[in-house]
């Protein structure tokens, strides 16, 4: 009985069931997909941004607050040269009289670099005109008292509160507005009578103002 011998088969060059090796173009595509997946992971971990390293600090705390400048309602009185209180509605001025308005106010001034001026403004009254007429015999003067500035040569200054230093904040200031009518004309003669004597003349004081303004 003869036997036939079968030679074993040569091993196959590819393993059964293994995935085929991707081509060069396919390998590039796989790498691109992997890079995209990595970018998504980094974006998610970084809060939605993909940038250089970044940090910020907040060196400022607190708030910036403004100061203020105001004065309380003035209480005023009028007196004549004898110190008597007068009522403008009934008082009748004659040559030789001097009448003075005195008003007091409370200053509210807060600001590290605040500088202001307190003054009496009568520029819109008839008496501003009279005072500029050399033959009217009328003179007008104003003054301010109670502030740290007692000179007033260039206006009466108000200095605002700085830190714990009050300066003029909280001070009571007194302002005066004085009208004087000379007893005689500038040449020494009497006023006489008639249109130029000043008889029955009237000058409104409604436009007199006490002004507190920042310099």
Image: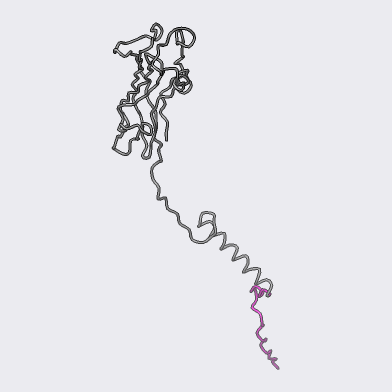
Q: Nearer the viewer, residue 52 or 122?
A: 122
- Residue at image position (35%, 17%) is 100
* Chain part drawn in magenta: 1-23
- Residue at image position (47%, 17%) is 126
Query: Image quadrant of residue 95?
Result: top left
Indicate the position of residue 72 as horizontal and vertical percent values: 37, 23
Instruction: Tell me which secondary structure the magenta stretch mostly adopts.
Output: loop
Compared to 30, does 13 lie above or below? below
The C terminus: image quadrant: top left
Q: Is residue 128 magenta?
A: no
Compared to 81, does 175 lie above or below? below
Count of numbered labels shown in the rendering? 0
Query: Image quadrant of residue 30?
Result: bottom right
Residue 34 as seen in the image, left or right of residue 75: right
Indicate the position of residue 90 as horizontal and vertical percent values: 39, 6
Residue farthest toward the bottom in the current orientation of the protein: 2
Q: Nearer the viewer, residue 35 or 68?
A: 68
Indicate the position of residue 125 as horizontal and vertical percent values: 47, 19
- Residue at image position (68%, 90%) is 7
């Amino acid at each position: 009985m003869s036997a036939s011998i079968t030679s074993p088969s040569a091993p196959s060059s590819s393993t059964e069931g293994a995935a085929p090796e991707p081509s060069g173009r396919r390998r590039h595509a796989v790498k691109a997909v992997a890079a995209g997946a990595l970018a998504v992971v980094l974006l998610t971990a970084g809060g939605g941004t993909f940038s250089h390293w970044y940090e910020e600090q907040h060196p400022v705390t607190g708030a910036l607050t403004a100061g203020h400048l105001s004065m309380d309602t003035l209480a005023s009185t009028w007196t004549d040269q004898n110190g008597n209180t007068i009522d403008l509605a009934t008082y009748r001025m004659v040559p030789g009289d001097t009448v003075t308005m005195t008003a007091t106010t409370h200053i509210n001034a807060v600001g590290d670099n605040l500088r202001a001026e307190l003054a009496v403004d009568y520029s819109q009254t008839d008496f501003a005109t009279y005072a500029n007429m050399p033959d009217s015999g009328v003179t007008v003067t104003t003054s301010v008292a109670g502030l740290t500035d007692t000179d007033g040569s260039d206006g009466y200054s108000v200095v605002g509160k700085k830190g714990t230093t009050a300066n003029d904040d909280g001070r009571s200031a007194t302002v005066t507005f004085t009208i004087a009518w000379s007893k005689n004309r500038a040449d020494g003669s009497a006023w006489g009578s008639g249109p130029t004597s000043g008889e029955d003349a009237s000058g409104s004081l409604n436009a007199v103002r006490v002004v507190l303004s920042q310099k």
